[in-house]
Amino acid sequence: MSIEENKAIVYKLFKAAKKNDSILLNELVFPNYINHTRQLQGREEYIQWLIRHFKTFPDFHVTLEDIVAERDLVCILMTVRGTHKGESHGIAPTGKKMKVRSVQIYRIADGKIVEGWTDFNFFMDQLDFMKNLGAIEYTEIGKKLFPESDT
């Protein structure tokens, strides 16, 4: 497959997940898919994770900042935003907004996504994410180290 075709597959993945389109997700994701970061094994486990995530944040919006592809790899830089309206990480819905920047890498083979990796600014975005959900409060020192973000 060409680099442009591989990019199109990744775009389709996000559109299908947003629509909870399990038929298209099944077409796009290899049965033995592995997500190394989230330690998800198999297409079904990954699809259920995606659908659960989009239900938790029903207004989930992805802004693709950049997409780069080489050989069988597609790398995206994105910012995601959403409102916490479902349980997440054991936290009941808070109605609070979140924003996380992420870099994701997908490996494509025979027109399907076979592997994935996610990297995000863990210390800033994940702390902001948990703070925004009300799971943590910063100490005075923490407030200086992690000033309010523009969520």
Image: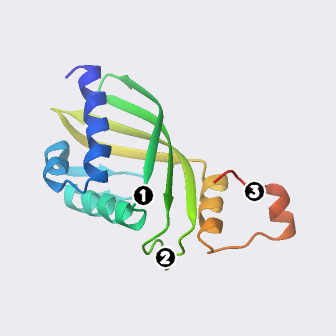
Pick whichever, 93 or 108, lies toward us: 93
Q: How is the image coloured?
A: rainbow
Q: Where does residue 103 sit, x and y in percent of width and height? A: 49, 40
Q: CA distance from mark 2 to mark 1?
A: 13 Å
Q: Quadrant of the C terminus?
A: bottom right
User: Where does label 3 land, which residue?
Assistant: 148
Which comes before the other along the chain, label 3 or label 1? 1
Query: Would you say the residues marked 2 and 1 are in contact, meaning their CB atoms lie under 8 Å apart?
Result: no
Q: Which residue is mark 1?
A: 59
Residue type (three-letter) at the residue carrying disc 3: Glu
Q: Amino acid at mark 2?
A: Pro
Q: Is residue 16 above or below residue 72?
A: below
Tell me the mark number nearer the camera, choosing from 2 and 1: 1
- Residue indicated by mark 2: 93
Residue sitting at 66 percent across and 55 percent down?
Answer: 123
Q: Residue at x 23, y 19 (%)?
A: 2
* N-terminal-most mark, 2 or 1: 1
- Of circles 3 and 1, the one toward us is 1
Q: What amino acid does circle 1 point to?
A: Asp
| Residue 17 higher or lower than 70, as above or below | below
Q: Is residue 5 left or right of residue 57?
A: left
